[in-house]
Amino acid sequence: MKKNIYILFLLLFASIQASFAQRQVIDRVVATVGSGIILQSDVDMQYSQWLAQGNKPNEKFKCGVLEQLIIQKLLSQQAVIDSIDVTETEVDDNLNARLRHMSQQAGGQERLEKFLNRSLLQYKEEMRPSVFEQLKANKMQQNIVQKVDVTPLEVKRYFEGLNQDSLPYFNTEVEIGEIVMMPKLTDAEKKEQREKIEGIRKQIVDGSDFGTMARLYSQDPGSAPYGGDLGFGTRDNYVKEFSAMAFKLKPGELSPIVESKYGFHIIQVLERRGEEVHSRHILMKINPGAAALERTKNKLDSIYKLVVDKKLDFYHAATNYSDAEESKFNGGMILNQEGSSRTTVIPMDGLEKSVFTAIDKLKPGEYSKPEQFTDKMGDVGYRFNYLKTRIPPHKANLDEDFTKIKEAAKQDKINRNLSKWFDDKSKTTFINISDEFGSCDELKKWKKQQ
């Protein structure tokens, strides 16, 4: 499997390099949109990435690529007219996220630079104009549809207008709650672990390279491969303990050990820009020992007993004792992460395996027993779940699926609004498409004025 991914990655960047070469040697304009142009290499680059993902060659795919680039041009040009701007920080953050993902796929920064045949700094600058335009187009589209909403009557009309013989069939869905407890260390237990990161800090003070030490010892998987680099961020980007220290430091200055809910940090600010800092850090998580785990288990067991015996209701128990920030302020109820609606109805087949197993045999109103689990950050804790509702498999209907149908109705209205906006815009914007794309059905509506 790893070998196949590696081969695909090689193909992807070979294609990208070819596209860059083509841009410089035989590039040509394939579409003009208002005052902007779209180059053949813009289309070829996206097509190359599509092929590298394992898709079979299909020249028709380029038709869809060109249509998306035309749409992007229309939106970004209107964004300029409407004074909708994108900051350098937003562009940097997007580029940094892309490069982090690409580096992970490539197996590290050095290997990625070898694939690209250029430094990441050079590649970043080459991609900047394209990313800037994409972000501006995205903002413009959000501006067009941000106030779109649907009334209950519109939802009802939308549903009644669907083909009733082909309505979707939903599998079992549930509403579930959770109470989570993560281990808390005593001062003595923390001191033992703090001494380890203090030793790392001393090595940096004595001359060791910060980036190298971060790659070797930091337990932040997102920044460790990049020498702890977090890029630019505002105060709101970090937990309060981190922000309080980072915004006090001078460029190049090393912080003392900072404790947050994530563990112990060593912070260094590289640069300041207005209300933003470019920082890097080394994180050492606070790993609980057997004693801390046992204390946590016992505490959760006692809460569980109070809830099951109805001496404490689940809502208040979750609000007062749960460590799950995503659910505790919702009375412990877990929100469906799919879609834009804040609904507590979740498909059973969308649950993580351990939660599915915990509630599978429960009846509504019952609780699973406290069990140890590992969260997405790799931290160990304890939790128990509450099954509030179980909705059997059924055909879509307004009574049980109003939230989902409302979301579909809203998306339909958004699509209609955008379609009208593009139709109106195309009538007042000069659009010229190369005859090479004359057979593309999806482009005919854009060529109607030629």
Image (cartoon, helix red, strand yellow):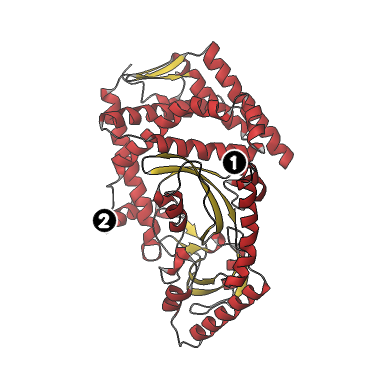
Where in the figure is residue 448, as x and y percent of width and height? 33, 21
Q: Is residue 412 above or below residue 298?
A: above
Q: Quadrant of the N terminus?
A: top right
Give SS at disc 2. Answer: loop
Q: Amino acid at mark 2?
A: Thr
Mark earlier in primary sequence (2, 1): 2
Q: Amino acid at mark 1?
A: Tyr
Name the side, left or right, on which 91 lies relative to 297: left
Q: Which residue is mark 1?
A: 226
Say the numbered circle drawn on residue 434: none
**Residue 85 sits in which quadrant?**
top left
Say the numbered circle drawn on residue 151: 2
**Residue 45 sits in which quadrant?**
top right
Task: Inspect this view and state whether residue 370 appears.
Answer: no
Residues 60 and 8: in front is 8
Residue neighbourhood size for the residue with mark 1, other residues' Cα within 10 Å, grouped as few (<14), some (14–19), many (≥20)? some
Where in the figure is residue 81, as x and y percent of width and height? 26, 29
Where in the figure is residue 284, as x and y percent of width and height? 60, 56
